[in-house]
Image (cartoon, coloured by chain):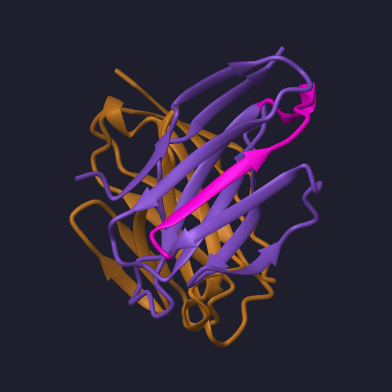
Chain colours: A orange, B purple
């Protein structure tokens, strides 16, 4: 299983762009990179997933360099409601992600 | 029309009791899971069922017994509850060929053993 490493915590202010980087040096060829968001007292929620290059949706962008050993979740213009824990996971789509392992996550605090 | 629903949301019980948590998903997913999130917020997989068959059992004490009557339901029964079982338990589901959307989680059951 590919292990992931991400910062324990980050602080930001409303309106700023936040970039959270995750290292996954042992990523396998068929692994996808997925990011989840967890608010207090709620289950994790899927944000974005990618395999290589760049993926963008209405919530975030995911940048993956050519070697795929890291990835960066970019949250444009954060608001107070983006305060949450963000998890980076690496796993294989063709196994239904059955062996996804959640790391410690990055606790993002957005202040006014 | 909640995608993954689990009940109860809160459960307070005494040591030694037996309790159950229920989970249902209406997404048509093939695979369901139970995760445990402890006080340090680590989220660890406990069990995974695919089409009612157990496929992952991550060294969980046999006091924990999952049961899947059909692929839309995965219940968790816990015997002889201990203080260390206090945690938030999350049910989740995924599709074998997820098409890029990974897991869908329920809102959790906070279990407190006193």
Asked if one can make out residue B7 in the rendered structure from this viewpoint, the answer is yes
The residue sitting at 81% across, 46% down in the picture is B61
Instruction: Examine the rendered structure and indicate whether residue A62 appears above or below residue B45.
Output: below
Which quadrant does the N terminus of chain A fall into? bottom right
Q: Is residue A88 above or below residue A17?
A: below
The structure residue drawn at horizontal position 28% and vertical position 56%, both measured from the top left corner, is B26
Location of residue B19 in the rendering, given as x and y in whole percent from the top left corner: 62, 30
Q: How many marks?
A: 0
- Magenta segment includes A56: no
Relative image position of residue A48 (x, y in whole percent): 34, 61
Q: Which residues are magenta?
A: B71-86
Q: Is residue B7 above or below residue B11?
A: below
User: Which quarter of the rendered picture does the C terminus of chain A lie within?
Assistant: top left
Residue depicted at 28% across the width and 50% down the height: B3
Whether residue B75 appears in magenta in the rendering, the answer is yes
Residue at 67%, 32% (x, y): give it: B38
């Amino acid at each position: 299983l590919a292990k992931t490493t991400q910062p324990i915590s980050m602080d930001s202010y409303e309106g700023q762009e936040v970039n959270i980087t995750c290292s996954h040096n042992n990523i396998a060829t068929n692994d996808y990179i997925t990011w989840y968001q967890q608010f207090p007292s709620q289950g994790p929620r899927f944000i974005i997933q990618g395999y290589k290059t760049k993926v963008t949706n209405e919530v975030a962008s995911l940048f993956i360099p050519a070697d795929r050993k890291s990835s960066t979740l970019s949250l444009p213009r954060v608001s107070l409601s983006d305060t949450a824990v963000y998890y980076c996971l690496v796993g294989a789509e063709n196994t239904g992600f059955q062996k996804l392992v959640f790391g410690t996550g990055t606790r993002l605090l957005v202040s006014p | 029309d909640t995608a993954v629903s689990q009940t109860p949301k809160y459960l307070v019980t005494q040591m030694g009791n037996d309790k159950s948590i229920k989970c249902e998903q209406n997404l048509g997913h093939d695979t369901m899971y139970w995760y445990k999130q402890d006080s340090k917020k680590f989220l660890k997989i406990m069990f995974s069922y695919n089409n009612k068959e157990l496929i992952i059992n991550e060294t969980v004490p046999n006091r924990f017994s999952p049961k899947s009557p059909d692929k839309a339901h995965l219940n968790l029964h816990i015997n002889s509850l201990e203080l260390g079982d206090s945690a938030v338990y999350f049910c989740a589901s995924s599709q074998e060929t997820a098409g890029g959307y990974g897991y869908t989680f329920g809102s959790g059951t906070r279990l407190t053993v006193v």
